[in-house]
Image (cartoon, rainbow, N blue to C red):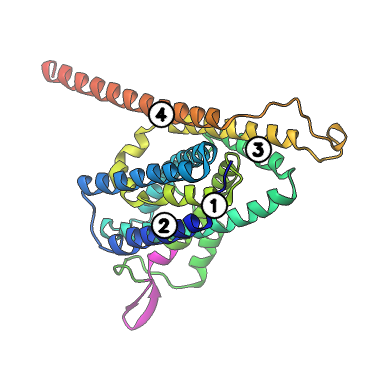
Amino acid sequence: MAETPLAFEIITFVVLALFFIVDLFVIGRRPHVPSTKECVQHIAFFVVMALIFGGCIWFFAGSKPAIEFYSGWLTEYSLSIDNLFVFVIIMSNFAVPKQIQKYVLSIGITIALIFRGIFILIGAALISRFTWVFFLFGAFLIYTAVKLVLGGDEDEEYHENGIIRNLRKIIKITDDYDGEKLRTTKNGVRYWTPMLIVFLTIGTTDVMFAFDSIPAIFGLTKDPFLVFTSNVFALLGLQQLYFLLGALLDKLVYLPAGLSVVLGFIGVKLIMEALHGNTLPFINGGEGIHWVPEVPTWLSLAVIVVAIGGASVASVIKMKSMESARKGLETVREYNP
């Protein structure tokens, strides 16, 4: 398997940086609620860019890293959609005006990218020195998958963490927003606006998201370049996806089930890889268990596509059936008042 050329990687980072700046701090700075057409065009552009990027990797480095990128990108994109549920709850709980929600999302996504970058560096350093880390990553992903199936990861309302509660006690915070400002003046007194709490809430939430995201992607590829680029492409266009899905997010009822299958599969795959390259003395005398099969890259991609695609299709079918049932009930009520 060939490695991606250094020049290609440098050009990729420059282009992605431009994409990110334009997406979040040029387009995202306009205080407006984007139309459905604008959202679809924006999302479609970045999806096509991700597909083309994967094709470039295939051309320069071969099919295996390209499939690893596609697998990682689809997984991270699906996790990002699931994370939007929490963003919706936060925006609603803090009554963030729709006109400035794009700006809030811009900051939140930027914080997410920073934390994921830090976690990627830490994860890459750990797995290069300690293969047993895969046992921890795998166990954590399986635990997360079980939580998703049991509904333990779903909150109908947002609960402030200890940091936010204590902060409210020691600083002056108004109840009203003043555009995008963090500080405002009322009756000659300086106050923090609720925007500060919103940013801190999204920031601490992004840290928790990274705990799911990074172990999952390292279960699909060990190449830090592919890990980082798949995360960036998954975050690009997330603003528009938030507004496009909006109220539909809570109708994707089977998405957590699809994600649980993906995370569970990756968790098992990581443990199998850890067993194959085992160095822990209390497991098989510190020797690798070589009869444990290696999961091919194409199988990972197939499981991700089937699980997420199947969950999305099933959600749409259920949504339409519920809508039809509702219309039927309304028709019956019209004829039988």
- The answer to the question of whether label 4 and label 2 lie on touching residues, with beta carbons closer than 8 A, is no
Question: Label 3: few (<14), some or many (≥20) within 10 Å?
Answer: many
Q: Where residue 309 is drawn, which disc sits there?
A: 4
Question: Label 1: few (<14), some or many (≥20) within 10 Å?
Answer: some
Amino acid type shown at disc 3: Gly
Of residues 159 and 199, the one drawn nearer to the viewer in this rendering = 199
Cα distance between the residues tagged 3 and 2: 30 Å
Q: Where residue 166 is drawn, which disc sits there?
A: none
Q: Where residue 225 is drawn, which disc sits there?
A: 1
Outermost residue to the left = 335
Residue 195 belongs to the span the image colors magenta:
yes
Amino acid type shown at disc 1: Phe
Residue 328 at x, y percent in the picture:
20, 18
Q: Depth-wise, is mark 4 or mark 2 nearer the camera?
A: 2
Q: Where residue 138 is drawn, which disc sits there?
A: 3
- Mark closest to the chain's N terminus, 2 or 1: 2
- The answer to the question of whether label 3 and label 1 lie on touching residues, with beta carbons closer than 8 A, is no
Q: In the picture provided, is 4 more to the left or to the right than 276?
A: left
Circle 2 is placed at which residue position? 16
Of residues 65 and 311, the one drawn nearer to the viewer in this rendering = 65
- Mark closest to the chain's N terminus, 3 or 2: 2
Q: Depth-wise, is mark 3 or mark 2 nearer the camera?
A: 2
Q: Which residues are magenta?
A: 182-197
* Corner quadrant of residue 122: bottom right
- Mark closest to the chain's N terminus, 4 or 1: 1
Amino acid type shown at disc 4: Gly
